[in-house]
Image (cartoon, helix red, strand yellow):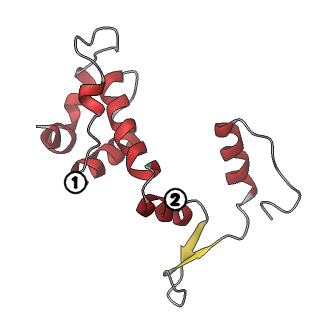
């Protein structure tokens, strides 16, 4: 059913407005266990990136999607540690590189500033972002 809503009938997301206070069951029932369906995770990602799903329309589903995507990217297993180390410094595909990607030695200034604003840190050295 989740695949149908987030895939084929994504327009329904506009009309499923339920607040966290209106939710009659614990939120954990929607966020645990972590989602392992790659097609559904792709739909969650696409709905968030394209603005098809917004927190003002249905905060519950917005939180569910964010929770599952967050778990996918930031879980503590070794595979996700490698994924994070490739996602953040990714610059361009590079066919001659061992991983097939080029990475920044230092994050570009605008990425570094955004990361710091999200994390609430102010640790910018002069060499970062050049």
Label 2 sits on residue:
84
Q: Residue at x 49, y 60 (%)?
A: 81
Query: Does residue 48 appear to the left or right of 107 in the view shown?
Result: left
Query: Does residue 3 appear to the left or right of 67 in the view shown?
Result: left
The residue positioned farthest toward the right in the image shown: 126
Q: Is 81 in front, or is 68?
A: 81
Question: Is label 1 in a helix, a strand or a loop?
Answer: helix
Q: Is 84 in front, or is 51?
A: 84
Which image quarter holds the N terminus? top left
Q: Is residue 49 visible?
A: no
Q: Which mark is residue 31?
A: none
Question: Is label 2 in a helix, a strand or a loop?
Answer: helix
Measure the C-alpha gap from mark 2 to mark 1. 20 Å
Query: Does residue 6 appear to the left or right of 69 in the view shown?
Result: left
Relative to 109, residue 122 above or below: above
Q: Which mark is residue 39?
A: 1
């Amino acid at each position: 059913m989740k695949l149908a809503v987030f895939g084929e009938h994504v327009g329904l997301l506009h009309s499923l407005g339920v607040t966290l206070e209106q939710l009659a069951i614990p939120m954990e029932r929607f966020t645990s266990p972590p989602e392992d369906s790659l097609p559904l995770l792709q739909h969650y990602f696409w709905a968030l990136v394209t603005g098809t799903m917004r927190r003002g329309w249905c905060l519950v589903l917005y939180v569910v999607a964010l929770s599952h995507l967050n778990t996918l990217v930031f879980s503590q297993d070794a595979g996700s540690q490698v994924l994070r180390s490739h996602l953040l410094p990714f610059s361009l595909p590079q066919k001659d590189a061992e991983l097939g990607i080029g990475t920044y030695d230092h994050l570009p200034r605008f990425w570094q500033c955004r990361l710091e604003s999200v994390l609430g840190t102010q640790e910018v050295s002069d060499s970062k972002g050049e």
